Amino acid sequence: MSDACTSSIVSLIPMVTGSISCIGSVIIIALILRSQSGLSSAYHRIIFGLSVSDIIHSLALGLVSIPMPKGTPNAWKALGNLTTCDLQGFFYMFGAMAAPAYNCSLSFYYMYKIKFKTSEEDMRKYKEPFLHGIPILLALICAIIPLSLGSFNPSVSWCWIQSYPFKCHEDPEVVCERGNKFDPYLLRWLVQGGPYVILFILICAAMSISYVEFRYEERRASAYRAESSVRMEFTAHRKFLRRAFQYVIAVLLTLVFPLISNPLDMYHTNVVPIEFLTYTFYPLQGLFNLLVYVSGCVSTLRERNTNLPLCQAIIDVFTGSKKFRSAQESSSLAVDSHDGSISINDTSSVNNSSGMADPGQRTDLTGISSCPTCTIFENDSQLPSDSTISLFLESAK
């Protein structure tokens, strides 16, 4: 296969997958803005930042070789110049670092909720500024350094960290015009590969802490396993943790192949299947995030409408049907935005020794981990009705 043909193929793949990812992130933003809580929850704000970062990244990748200078050898449709190449490289690098950094913030968000029971108010005041500020600052630093060194130049399929002319730093007979102030391969690892590894370690650490905490609470509540309410509660917690791991899998699917292909490229070893897998999966994080986000919405809808077919539930989520809005509004378990406080509103007579509330009284059980039968609510509007509580208590007897 000729170099020109190979370049055309590897350019078309990220153009298609990048466009798909961009559409997926746009849909997530639309679903968030149209939801009942909008941007009022920390979870939605982090997912919003993640989606915006992915849109920037996907658009830069989707342009492939078009911003490269005219006349670039083996480049498909090179129509730009060095300035447009710098712009593509900057926005590519910004999105490439901001998106996984936001994934790391999302993992820490789940850790704060599961391990430390951080309230929404404390999350907004004390934690969230760092969960947004660090990804943006990291992305700016990693994008500005190569830009200042003139290292954003034509690469295989888009403008990235490379010497100009292409790989001139490896040929002593070719005079480099730019990009040779710092070894391109080493710079890639300093501003992208190395941070990816660190972010991956932080994500694994945060999720491990969350999982260990979940298992610890489950063991402490083993005495309550006979009650149906306990099974309901831990089923909800399990779904909560499963969602967190799904987002981790989404980011790993996009990063695993680049982390394999970049060292191979450094040692001039090109494995064609790895290259194609990189160009296919690397731009697709927006699609993977959409699948995770929508699966949670569909799960909520079908829990409230047990006979609803899967296909119809998916349609209701995307169209924002009244049924889906009603499920969002009346859902008794606010998994994504609970504030760590545990409340129960009961109108029936219950024995206080059982750990439940007095008749007609709302009891605040914030921080009491020995009450696994209680349900977590974001605000009073999400509390179940009196009839629902009566049935709940009857089934727990």
Image: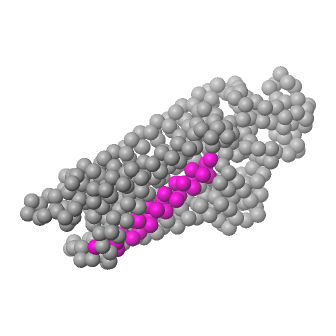
Q: Quadrant of the C terminus?
A: top right
Image check: 27 left or right of 370?
Answer: left
- Front position in the image: 155 or 147: 147
Image check: 192 left or right of 34?
Answer: left
Image check: 167 left or right of 161?
Answer: left
Task: Determine the image quadrant of residue 230.
Answer: top right
Residue 99 appearing in the image: yes
Coloring basis for residues:
one colour
Q: Quadrant of the N terminus?
A: bottom left
Check the image and name the residue furthest to the top.
353
Q: Return the x and y of residue 332 as percentages of the image width and height.
A: 76, 46
Depicted 249 relative to depicted 220: above or below:
below
Depicted 266 relative to depicted 235: above or below:
below
Was residue 311 drawn as part of the magenta stretch in this picture? Answer: no
Range of magenta residues: 42-69
Image check: 244 left or right of 162?
Answer: right
Task: Determine the image quadrant of residue 238.
Answer: top right
Q: Residue at x 76, y 30 (%)?
A: 365
- Front position in the image: 344 or 103: 103
Depicted 119 relative to depicted 191: above or below:
above
Provide the major secondary structure of the magenta segment: helix
Q: Return the x and y of residue 329 as percentages of the image width and height.
A: 76, 53
Q: Return the x and y of residue 139 as percentages of the image width and height.
A: 42, 52
Check the image and name the residue furthest to the left.
173
Q: Residue at x 57, y 50 (%)?
A: 46
Q: Return the x and y of residue 375 as percentages of the image width and height.
A: 74, 38
Residue 264 appearing in the image: no
